[in-house]
Image: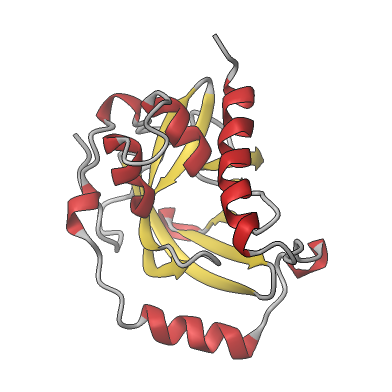
Amino acid sequence: MESVDVVCMKMKNTVGLLLLCALSACTRAPDHMKELSNPTVEAKVEARLAEWQSDHADLRPGLGGLVVSNADPTGEWKNHDMAMESNRMTVRRRRGGQYEVLFSTHGCVDYWTLTRQAACSNGVFQMAKPVEEYSGAQYDTLYTLAVSNQTVLLPQSAARTVDSGSSFSQYPKEQRALFLGFRKETGGTQQAGCTVPTGARGRTPAVP
């Protein structure tokens, strides 16, 4: 059986080849763009996000067996680290059980950074406002999953794909989650407790 890393690499190569057909001249944004502010672009992104409405069908993915209710969301997270796009999140714990999120995304020609407040309960990481990836995916909720001995933050925008297999159907659900979710790079522990104290703000959708 192929290892998870080998499968993920094959999936990345498949996506990369398809995109390269249309973006053959596209090169990866320099690393120094990762967490820089880009006010003009960020204002346009925030304007789009102001009209965003959550797809409630994605709030209860059929991934209950993978959800980790006590995972620590703090630390550095990364996903889609390919030539066309890279997304990162830095999550820091604040007083009262709340979190601060520094979300950054960059691709061929642009980059932006968004700051959000968040709460976490029963494996559901809920931001006060949505974010937008370079590729256009928008979401305010991520699910904390345990996949192949790793902790993954899966955006709600990817939950349906992982659950239904509408993309990458040749791979098991766990490997789809590993490819589409954020993987932790540094910081945090597995037992810190993803909970919200009594009276804390924030919507906390249930996960089966």
Quick check: can you spot residue 126?
no
187 above or below 34?
A: above
Residue 104 location in percent, x, y?
61, 65
Task: Work out which residue is located at the far top of the displayed protein and give it.
Answer: 1
Report the residue at 34% width, 31% height from top. 67
Q: Is residue 119 left or right of residue 20?
A: left
Horizontal side of 29 relative to 114 (left or right) equals: right
Q: Nearer the viewer, residue 37 or 99?
A: 37
Could one spot residue 125 in this view of the protein? yes
Q: Tell how many labels.
A: 0
Residue 123 % position (x, y): 35, 39
Its colouring scheme is secondary structure
Q: x and y percent of residue 96 in the render?
A: 42, 57
- The residue located at (39%, 23%) in the rendering is 172
Between 36 and 172, which is closer to the camera in this rendering? Answer: 172
Q: Percent position (x, y) of residue 157?
A: 35, 54
Quarter of the rendering containing residue 177: top left
Q: Is residue 82 above or below residue 169?
A: below
Left or right, 57 with reference to 110: left
Q: Quadrant of the C terminus?
A: top left
Query: Where does the N terminus fall, quadrant-wise?
Result: top right
